[in-house]
Image (cartoon, grey):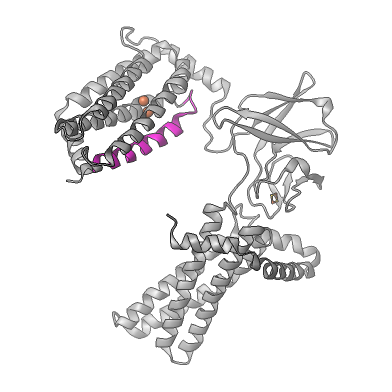
Amino acid sequence: MTSLPERIAASLEAAEGLDAPAYKVADAATMVLELTGTASQPIQNALHGTWLGHPLHPALATLPIGTWTMALGLDSSEALGLAPQRELGKAADVALKVGVAGAAAAAVAGMADWRQIHGRDRRTGLGHAALNSVALGLTIGSLALRRRGHRGLGRVASGAGWLALAAGAYLGGHLVYRRRIGVDQGDRSPEPRGFHPVLPAAALEEDRPRRVELWDPAARAMIGVVLVRHQGRVHAMGSRCSHMGGPLDEGWVQNGGLVCPWHGSRYCLSTGRVLDGPSTAPQPRYEVRINNDQIEIRRVLEPGDEALTPEEIDAARAEAEAEAEAPSEARKADEVLFEHHQLLRRLFETVEAMDPNDPERRDMMRLLAGELEIHEHVEDVIFYPAVRPVSEDVPVAHAEHQQLADMLAVTLRLGPSSPEFEEQLRALYEAVDHHASSEETSMFKEAQRLGEARLRELGGQIEAMLEHERESRARRAFRALKIRLLEGG
Ligand code: FES
Ligand SMILES: [Fe+2]
Ligand SMILES: [Fe+2]
């Protein structure tokens, strides 16, 4: 079921009648910009936030949102007589004025961004702008009323303005979070981490951008990269424009930059930096070398990318071999975890097969919940940190653990005899099975790079922790309490 605000946004998106007025407004804004002549591009860059590396409009929008909300609180306190009234009223007036300045600046920056969007998003943007203009108008009106001594009426006007602001903010959020306007649309795949041949060097002509593709096994997607030979040097950057995904390989070279054919963002060929907006995010960059007449590229990793170069993998293996003194009778970590996966699967099948009204079903469910918790705990604490240097799956697996915990909470709350329980239990089983299977087919394989000795050492630690979790009275009591709380009493 869709919510009322969603339905309103959807009908706004479908309202083609808004297109004609929208183009008139956009044309007028373009004309104003054109009047500024050669200053137009720097002004646009300033308004988009190219200099900031983030869109400027949402940053400015926080000013009216914050100050007008504060004014609403102060006004309410004044109306309720909660504190010295003159002081409260004065503070509310100042807050409203600061917000008016912020709203005006946000409107200009927002208009610059809005000119670049089309179709349904342009209509939503128009609705967003209209609501915010109403909010601004009401707030200015409120300030005028207050100045003439009509404080009560002034408070009503700015309160109504705040409501319009909130509705406008919903549409702004819809544009960003649902329609992905203003978010970085570049392909940020960290692949390839090592040099990878992509094109014979002779096939790349001067100043003629050319697209090549690479396979990212983690994202299971082809990643487009654009190659440009400029003044004899070969450059490479992501081919999907970070502004709205335009094809940079269909763009052109201008003043040392590659221009996007869609809205004209220009990116520095050698650094990927934005030289001209509307884009605010740099393009993903690749290092280039020529080897055996082939162009080879390697991704320049960004801060926060898991460092996983071949050298680092080798280093991790060498370190593991240096620690090869681990007790050899312990089983390997992946074997221990696989066995535990099988136990979890059996428990699921047992609970599924039990009669819904069987009083023991709840106990079996608790046992299952406890084992699942223990499993995630040992992986989070021992296994995942250990395999992080050799497997890219760890962040996803962590996220899946969160998801499994959420699903387990819902299942426990339903109770084993409720009608929805079966469906929820099935969903949880499928999610656990999917998660465990992907560990078995991918992460456990990659973990072999740690070397046998290290895996046995980890296996020993995991078995010890499994035992401790099951045997320790304190840990058992803690888990039991948690499960009761999740069951709702
Ligand atoms: S998609 Fe808008 S400038 Fe590239
Ligand atoms: Fe897991
Ligand atoms: Fe697991």
Name the residue nearer the viewer: 36 or 210: 210
User: Which range of residues does the magenta coloring cover?
Assistant: 389-413
Q: State the residue lying farthest toward the top.
A: 329
Please tell me which residue is depicted at 48% across the width and 25% down the height of the picture.
391
The quarter holding residue 176 reads: bottom right
The quarter holding residue 149 reads: bottom left
Question: Dividing the image into 4 quarters, which one contains the N terminus?
Answer: bottom left
**Residue 393 is inside the magenta segment:** yes
Please tell me which residue is depicted at 77% across the width and 68% down the height of the picture.
36
Name the residue nearer the viewer: 453 or 485: 485
Note whether residue 59 is visible: no
**Residue 85 is inside the magenta segment:** no
> What is the number of callouts on the image?
0
Location of residue 488 in the rendering, given as x and y in whole percent from the top left corner:
20, 46
127 left or right of 322 in image: right
Name the residue nearer the viewer: 76 or 89: 76
Magenta: predominant secondary structure element? helix
Location of residue 312 in the rendering, given as x and y in whole percent from the top left corner:
53, 22
| 455 in relation to 133, above or below | above
Location of residue 153 in the rendering, given as x and y in whole percent from the top left corner:
43, 87
Location of residue 269 in the rendering, given as x and y in whole percent from the top left corner:
75, 41
Please tell me which residue is depicted at 63% across the width and 57% down the height of the picture.
49
Q: State the residue lying farthest toward the bottom.
A: 148
